[in-house]
Image: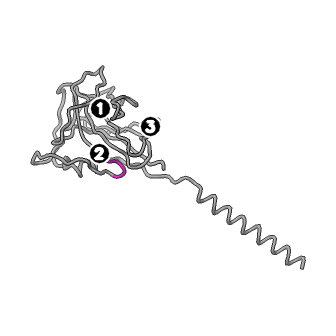
């Protein structure tokens, strides 16, 4: 009887350990992959069809507005322009209030080569609209071959692109873009987004 009781106790402890281990595994946080919405945006808009480099053409603040469909964060900034720029400024805005959330500078040492900068993550709220811009006098002008307009919104993974706009600026100014356009996209700038819940 004592042997049976000992076996029962050992089995109970073993089952409890397995059960606890299973519960611990379920509680581990899910790690989501990073997403870069640019390729899906270009494909969905048709602006991947034609690209022309524009250099030294007046300084503009330009970019796209978007809404994340999930809560997440921006981990890195990605840019490719047709000229060098040691201090290219990229800005994330609150679209509703037109206020700057965060600005970062990126060194672009080589024309037409993609540069990525890891940043302190910027938290994004699900369904909140943001604006993502760059301040530059150089860009890649992307259009459809026939010049027709894109239809917004455009789904790019967990990011919904809601529009594109620009405004004349200076290197010292950060001005919210108000001139919306749907027949082209000036770029290339984007970010790496990661869902957090």
Q: Which residue is mark 2?
A: 161
Q: Quadrant of the N terminus?
A: bottom right
Q: Is residue 191 above or below residue 46?
A: above
Q: Is residue 133 left or right of residue 13?
A: left
Q: Which residue is mark 3?
A: 122
Q: Which mark lies nearer to you, 3 or 1?
A: 3
Residue pictured at 37% horizontal, 29% vertical: 100
Q: Which residue is mark 1?
A: 134
Q: Are marks 1 and 2 in contact (CB under 8 Å)?
A: no
Along the line of sight, the residue nearer the viewer: 170 or 76: 170
**Which of disc 1 and disc 3 is earlier in sequence?**
3
User: Residue 139, position in %: x, y?
Assistant: 22, 34
**Which of disc 3 and disc 2 is earlier in sequence?**
3
Q: Residues within 10 Å of mark 1 (few under 14, many from 20)?
A: many
Q: Is residue 47 above or below residue 1?
A: above
Residue 2, quarter of picture: bottom right
Magenta region: which residues? 157-161
């Amino acid at each position: 009887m004592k042997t049976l009781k000992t076996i029962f106790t050992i089995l109970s402890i073993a089952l409890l350990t397995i059960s606890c281990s299973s519960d611990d595994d379920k509680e581990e946080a899910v790690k989501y992959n990073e997403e870069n919405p640019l390729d899906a945006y270009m494909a969905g808009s048709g602006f991947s069809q034609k690209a022309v480099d524009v250099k030294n053409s007046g300084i503009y603040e330009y970019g796209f507005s978007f809404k994340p469909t999930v809560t997440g964060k921006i981990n890195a900034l990605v840019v490719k322009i047709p000229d060098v720029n040691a201090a290219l400024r990229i800005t994330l805005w609150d679209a509703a209030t037109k206020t700057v959330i965060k600005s970062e500078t990126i060194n672009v040492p080589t024309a037409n080569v993609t540069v990525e900068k890891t940043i302190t993550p910027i938290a994004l709220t699900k369904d909140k609209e943001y604006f993502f811009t760059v301040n530059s006098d150089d860009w890649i002008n992307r259009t459809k071959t026939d010049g027709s307009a894109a239809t917004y919104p455009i789904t790019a993974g967990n990011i919904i692109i809601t529009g594109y706009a620009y405004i004349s600026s200076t290197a010292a100014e950060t001005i919210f873009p108000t001139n919306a356009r749907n027949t082209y996209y000036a770029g290339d700038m984007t970010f790496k987004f990661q869902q957090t819940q």
